[in-house]
Image: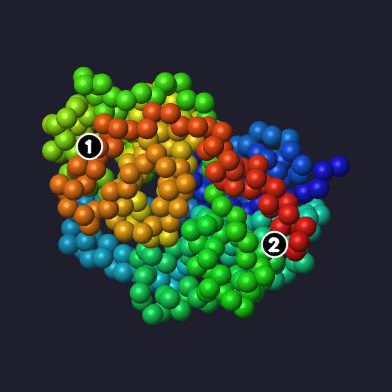
């Protein structure tokens, strides 16, 4: 009989976001050896897992956002000065409420998920509880459970805890709240894992619990056979660019890419976008919008053309866009546009080699010349065996093996 694991992930969007794809990749490896129960929030998954080794449990089933509440009120009745004033008051109250509970996001779902976890632990014997943080709610649920039950707990994080580079950065009160929740997690978790981009940061920050910290990188590299025979572009060939992922201006802004290519007259340029944004055709660039697609379908499209992968760096310095692992897995040449001069993404791209980095702080003329040289001399052959070796610590099988080792150590 297989031993059991309990996964806690508050935002398990099936084959949709980077954190969920990381969890799925780990899950697909571990379910061979273990039975896995997953606790997630109700309204998140559009697709149920159909697998005898995996059981998905729902929390409260209520996901309430500030925007949803404001939009609902905005559509009630006719516009009037009273309604505008009421909306203003509601936004202020919601803002105060959000600041009070932050970094916890799911004020309703966290208690429900905690209750569900306690019920399952009472019913079943788990060798470990593993929380995966897209947002910190997953760890908060596990923290509440750990305080009440003697169960091994591994806290797996792929982003900062919580993501301190966003709305509350450099505000003393919220830095205090960040450190407080971090300290609670470090004290109560039996092991905490971070990718290369964060491991050394937290090693310095949490010197009092360094024995609990483990390096566990992104489980996102797979050797994908590409249908296209790579070759240098001919005189009449168009430049096929590919962007995969979301385009939220608060996180990453595509305008610099448009500015960069506005003076690129060497060859016709087409940008294919697979994600949640719809872009308009431009005079200097044709746009193909594929819309949101499940990850496997997106990879299928990316295999069919002689693409150059476009990465647009996050405004959050410590985050690594998961799309770079898709591009590397597909053996695509990569143009990486960055807001910051030195970013964690550099570590992976330098190991890969077939890329150029465009720093927005350099002049547009300088960067355009770099792009021209890269496109006209782009590497055409990538050694799959060499890439597999270089990125073996990012393979799902390696990451699953490391989790097994961590479980045996704690």
Q: Which residue is mark 1?
A: 372
In-front residue for pair 165/149: 165
Using the image, determine if residue 148 lies above or below residue 367. Answer: below
Left or right of residue 57, residue 62 in this image:
left
- From the viewer's perspective, is the residue at label 1 or at label 2 nearer? 1
x and y percent of residue 410 in the render? Answer: 75, 63
The Cα atoms of the two marked residues, 1 and 2, are separated by 50 Å
- Front position in the image: 292 or 26: 26
Give the image location of residue 230, x and y in percent: 39, 24
Which residue is tagged 2? 153
Q: Position of residue 120 (x, y in %)?
A: 74, 54
Classify residue 125 by image quadrant.
bottom right
Disc 1 residue crowd, few under 14, some 14–19, many 20+, Cα 10 Å: some
Q: Is residue 248 visible?
A: no
Left or right: where does residue 120 sit relative to residue 65? right
Q: Secondary structure at mark 1?
A: helix
Q: Is residue 125 above or below residue 244?
A: below
Mark 2 closeness class: few <14, some 14–19, many ≥20 residues within 10 Å: many
């Amino acid at each position: 009989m297989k031993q059991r694991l309990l996964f806690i992930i508050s935002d398990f969007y099936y084959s949709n976001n980077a954190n969920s794809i990381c969890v799925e990749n780990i899950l697909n490896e571990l379910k061979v050896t273990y039975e896995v129960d997953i606790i997630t929030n109700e309204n998140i998954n559009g697709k149920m897992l159909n697998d005898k080794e995996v059981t998905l449990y729902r929390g409260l089933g209520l996901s309430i956002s500030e925007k949803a509440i404001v939009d609902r009120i905005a559509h009630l009745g006719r516009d009037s000065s009273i309604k505008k004033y009421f909306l203003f008051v509601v936004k202020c109250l919601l803002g105060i409420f959000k600041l009070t509970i932050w970094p916890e996001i799911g004020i309703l779902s966290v208690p429900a998920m905690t209750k569900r976890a306690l019920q399952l632990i009472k019913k079943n014997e788990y060798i470990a509880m593993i929380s995966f943080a897209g947002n910190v709610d997953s760890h908060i649920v596990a923290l509440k459970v750990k305080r009440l039950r003697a169960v091994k707990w591994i806290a797996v994080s792929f982003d900062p805890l919580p993501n301190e580079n966003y709305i509350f950065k450099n505000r003393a009160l919220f830095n205090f709240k960040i450190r407080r929740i971090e300290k609670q997690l470090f004290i109560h978790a039996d092991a905490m894992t971070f990718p290369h981009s964060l491991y050394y940061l937290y090693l310095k920050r949490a010197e009092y619990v360094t024995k609990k910290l483990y390096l566990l990188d992104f489980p996102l590299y797979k050797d994908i056979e590409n249908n296209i025979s790579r070759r240098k572009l001919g005189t009449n060939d168009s430049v096929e660019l590919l962007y995969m992922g979301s385009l939220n201006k608060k996180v990453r802004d595509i305008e610099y890419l448009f500015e960069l290519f506005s003076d690129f007259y060497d060859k016709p340029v087409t940008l294919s976008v697979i994600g949640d944004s719809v872009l308009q055709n431009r005079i200097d660039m044709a746009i193909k919008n594929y819309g949101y697609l499940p990850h496997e379908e997106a990879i299928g499209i990316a295999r069919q053309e002689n693409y150059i992968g476009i990465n647009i760096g996050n405004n959050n310095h410590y985050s690594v866009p998961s799309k770079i692992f898709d591009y590397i897995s597909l053996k695509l040449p990569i143009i990486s546009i960055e807001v910051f001069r030195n970013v964690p993404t550099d570590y992976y791209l330098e190991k890969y080699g077939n890329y150029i980095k465009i720093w927005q702080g350099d002049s547009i003329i300088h960067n355009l010349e770099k792009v021209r040289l890269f496109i006209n001399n782009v590497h055409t052959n990538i050694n799959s065996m060499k890439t597999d070796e270089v990125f073996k610590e990012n393979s799902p099988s390696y990451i699953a093996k490391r989790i097994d080792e961590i479980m045996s150590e704690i």
